[in-house]
Image (spheres, rainbow, N blue to C red):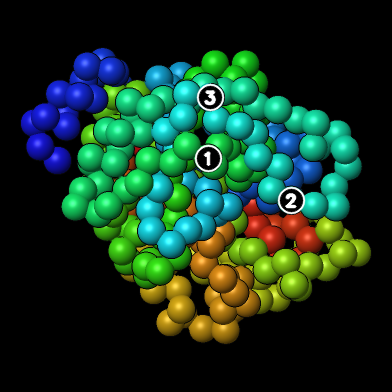
Amino acid sequence: MNLNDLQNISNNFGNTQRMPVLFLGHGSPMNAIEENQFVQGFRKAAHEIPKPNAILCISAHWYTKGTFVTAMDMPRTIHDFGGFPKALFDVQYPAPGNPELARETAELLAPVLVDEDHNWGLDHGAWSVIKHMYPEADIPVIQLSIDYTKPAQYHFDLAKRLNELREKGILIIGSGNIVHNLRLIDWKNIDTVGAGWDWAVEAREKTNSWLLDGNFQNIIDYQKQGTFLQYAVPTPDHYLPLIYTLGLKDQSESLSLFNNELIGGSLSMTSVRIG
């Protein structure tokens, strides 16, 4: 980051108390319209931190070749799912965007080429959780895509370049699920909190231990950790938002877990706060 980048951010957002970073286990899109312990956990997390000037979300559901950032004034609400009730498709989250923040985010990530996007909007990985935290939709939200051609270590290192945004009141949220295997859902227990296959229980216990111990390298090297994580992370899209969150942690910062439950056999709602 150079002085010009820092000056650009300073012009748009004054210095603030350093913002925490969140990873939110977003689970089913139905969490957007249901009342349960997990959405209560999202609200509680928002109440416990300063109100942000803007939000930068890295969602599992914007998985692209290359890296993009939303740069429109008013991002649309994307209903990127099927087979759910009409009430869910009726939800709109009309938060503004912030083209200036998008541009500055792209500059911070240089020399990685980050293209400004004017077509995407807010997918359900973003709006289904943020709507519970900030229901007035009065905080600008931008999204940063996940380049599927790059390994976890790349994303961990890339995230570090975003740290200056935290000093300007920007809340950075990763949204996905640590354990996420839709093919192995236990439909009889789809709404049973605490229901998990043996491998899911092991994955949750091991990753929780690594998170709390600060052993992030094991989390980055998830493909080397054994069968339990191969089942838990059959594809990396929902896992990589966690990697971005961890890449933003300073050594002196605390890390805590909330919404720390399995559901439906093969999903974990475990969420992480840093700072």
The N terminus - image quarter: top left
Which of the two discs, 2 and 3, labels the residue nearer the N terminus? 3
**Residue drawn where x is 76% and y is 73% of the image:** 184
Q: Is there any visible trace of residue 24 in the rendered image? A: no
Label 2 SS: loop
Mark in the foreground, 1 or 3: 1
Q: Quadrant of the C terminus?
A: top left
Mark before the other along the chain sequence, 1 or 3? 3
On residue 81, the disc is 2
| Frontmost residue, 82 versus 172 | 82
Looking at the picture, which amino acid does disc 3 mark? Met
In the displayed structure image, the side of residue 47 where residue 5 appears, left or right:
left
- What residue would you read off at disc 1? 119
Q: Find the distance from the CA under tag 1 to the CA under tag 3.
A: 11 Å
Count neighbours of disc 1 (C-alpha within 10 A) and say few if under 14, some if 14 to 19, many if 20 or more.
few
Q: In the image, what residue occupies the spot 41% across and 25% down?
A: 98
Q: Say which amino acid is labelled 2.
A: Phe
Residue 269 image point, x, y percent:
64, 51
Q: Residue at x 65, y 58 (%)?
A: 268
Image mark for residue 74: 3
* Most distant residue in the left direction: 3
The dot on residue 101 is: none
Q: Amino acid at mark 1?
A: Asn
Q: Can residue 223 be seen in the rendering of this structure?
A: yes
